[in-house]
Image (tube, rainbow, N blue to C red):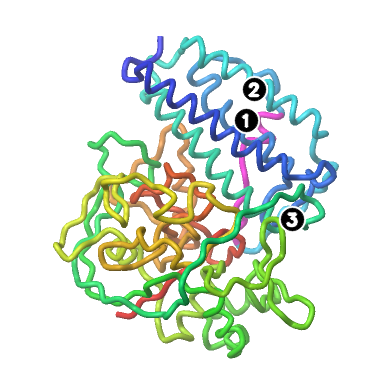
Amino acid sequence: MLATQNDTAMMRELQQRLLDARRRTDELFSLVKPDALYARPIPERHRIIFYIGHLEAFDWNLLGERIFGLKSFNPEFDLLFAFGIDPVGGGLPDDQPSAWPPAKQVYEYAGTLRHILDGSLATGTSDSASAGFSLATLLNVAIEHRLMHAETLAYMLHQLPLDKKILRATSESPSAPRIEPRMFDIPAGPAVLGQRRSDEQFGWDNEFEAVTADVPAFAIDQYKVTNGQYLDFVQAGGCDTPALRSEDDWKWKSAQSISHPVFWKRGTGGQWHYRGMFAEVPLPMNAPVYVSRAEAKAYARWAGKELPTEAEWHRAAYGSNAGTESASPHVYPWGKAEQPGSRFGNFDFAAWDPTPVNAFPEGNSAFGVGDLIGNGWEWTSTPFAPLPGFEPFPFYRGYSADFFDGKHFVMKGGSARTAACMLRRSFRNWFQSHYQYAYAGFRCVQR
């Protein structure tokens, strides 16, 4: 029978969450016209067809034999769709569409995997008595892995030409007053990174074990840097100034001919537009700019500032003048009394595009810092590395450890397409410094 710690109510909730997550990813695939399923909107990523198979293959490889003792009916596809890619050092995939199976076969494979796994989950029979971890943990992994892809697929489709998508009407962005950029002083105090295993809350391996950092006083931007602020940088020649970048960043920028954020597009008459999910619109000046960490660093240097550390970001988001901070994952900048809701920010699939950075004042932290959760991840200066006491998942040893390489950096906060369950304060996202395509912005600090 199922492990005793997985009571019936919890298992029903997890199965419902899995169904909800599937609906999210199914919705994204339904936006792609059939003739675009073999497109590669982002050079560093697989073709779209891969992800149709990957999401189901991941669940199967995680649960099928390990938990339910099921035997594969298509080992070739299990392997083909097992792993994504994260090229470092400029290597890009060069496969051709003909290298992938026909879409009909991929959809049939994915549908069969769902049917078999759902049948096993419904009967509750399991061979996992000695596995050393609960089915609930593995289901959380499956759910959040899929929800992560719901976000990465969204920003992939952002780069897909509009004529390759089935377009939808979108709601208007909320109104907000004009922004007056300012910085807030954050007093010295503690920042708690990660969460405690003893709390028995789900988290990925890199979220453990909780550690307290003493953070000196600093000042931080009230909001993320906006498109309007970044446009000032572009028009001042910041993109073409080698002194604002490291040698490696300048080589990358020059090799890729990068002169503006990848979400921007110059329209007729030289006017800048934002590449929205379903339409190109005049550049929303009060929305956050989405850029790579290398581009964010160059702006910060131009402005005479720096990117925050992970601990500084935590201090601004979750700290208080009282000098305390909880290690509970269910604490938010607006406090722990209420779970993430629509009045606190732009997250949990609320919108396809960013909103003004000052549109949700109820989400401000105790120090008055705004737009910390949702509306765009925020780059930090902290290399992605293990917290003290890190232990890799025995069933997914490379999830974090493969990226402790000094080339990936921590991002915090969340975007409009980040699921509510991953807005917990201990969640750590990460990307390479030269990755432009994520829904990621930044704010600056002065020390």
Q: Secondary structure at mark 1?
A: helix
Report which quarter residue 155 is drawn in: bottom right
Q: CA separation, marks 2 and 3?
A: 28 Å
Which is nearer the eye, 98 or 310? 310
Residue topped by disc 2: 113
Q: Is residue 79 magenta?
A: yes
First reached walking from the N terminus: tag 3 or tag 1: 1
Q: Amino acid at mark 1?
A: Glu
The stretch of residues the image draws in magenta is 77-88
Residue topped by disc 3: 160
Which is nearer the eye, 420 or 279? 279
Q: Are marks 3 and 1 in contact (CB under 8 Å)?
A: no
State the predominant SS element of the stretch in magenta: loop
Q: Amino acid at mark 3?
A: Leu
Q: CA separation, marks 2 and 1?
A: 6 Å
Q: Is residue 110 magenta?
A: no
Which is nearer the eye, 186 or 63? 186
Q: Amino acid at mark 2?
A: Leu
